[in-house]
Amino acid sequence: MKKKKIIVAITGASGSIYAKLLLDNLLKLSSQIENVGIVMSDNAKEVWRFELGNEEYDNYPFTFYHKMDFNAPFASGSAKFDTMIIIPCSMGTLGRIAHGISNDLISRAADVILKERRKLIAVVRDTPFSLIHINNLKTVTEAGGIICPANPSFYSLPKTIEEVAQTVVNRVIDLAGLEQESYRWNEE
């Protein structure tokens, strides 16, 4: 299997637990991954500190890029990053992507992924959706993106908040094309 080059973008939507669990899982799946580049918005750092009570995002052994670093390799299609996961994805970020507004590294990287016909996974967390949100979800989907709402499943009978959130992260990992052990419906 070809190793993946993955961009992880973390925005200021509520749901830092999803980003943390994804980063934890990417560490465990490192044999399938060539490179992970991470970009966080300022709001993402604030929300992480508020929701998780720490700044442990700094402790991951991945390469972090400033939100305005247009020299990051994945700001160009020539770097051949094949997957971008925005987790959690704010509706503001999704709106900028839907309308081609590349005013920071997150929206530029998403623009590159879409124009190169590679895999963009947006883990949207807001609810309810306004008609503007729905239209932006539709636009990104029509452009080739995958909208993966942060809607947990319960058929695995999760017992903790982390286990509930992990059901979403498991779907994201599957969508990214990584192999993992996880609960599968009606399999023994």
Image: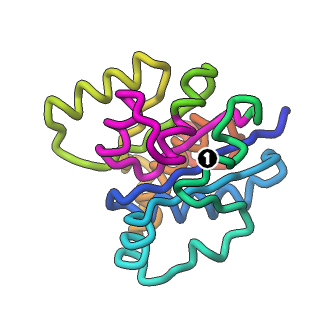
Q: Report crowding for label 1: few under 14, some 14 to 19, many 20 or more residues within 10 A (C-alpha).
A: some
Q: Is residue 18 shown in magenta?
A: no
Q: Which residue is drawn at 45% across and 18% down?
A: 143
Left or right, 110 with respect to 42, comes to right
Q: Is residue 98 shown in magenta?
A: yes
Which portion, as a residue range, is magenta? 81-110
Q: In which quarter of the image is the N terminus?
A: top right
Is there any visible trace of residue 42 in the rendered image? yes
Mark 1 = which residue?
70
Q: Height in image: 39 above or below 140?
A: below
Q: Identity of the amino acid at label 1?
A: Phe
30 and 64: which one is in front?
64
Q: Residue at x 51, y 46 (%)?
A: 106
Residue 100 image offset from top left, x and y in percent: 41, 28
Q: Residue at x 23, y 34 (%)?
A: 133
Residue 171 image offset from top left, x and y in percent: 52, 41
Q: Quadrant of the C terminus?
A: top right
The quadrant in which residue 98 appears is: top left
Q: Which residue is drawn at 75% across and 32% down?
A: 80
Residue 23 image offset from top left, x and y in percent: 61, 60
Q: Height in image: 107 above or below 21?
A: above
118 and 70: which one is in front?
70
108 and 118: which one is in front?
108
Which SS class for mark 1?
loop
160 and 22: which one is in front?
22
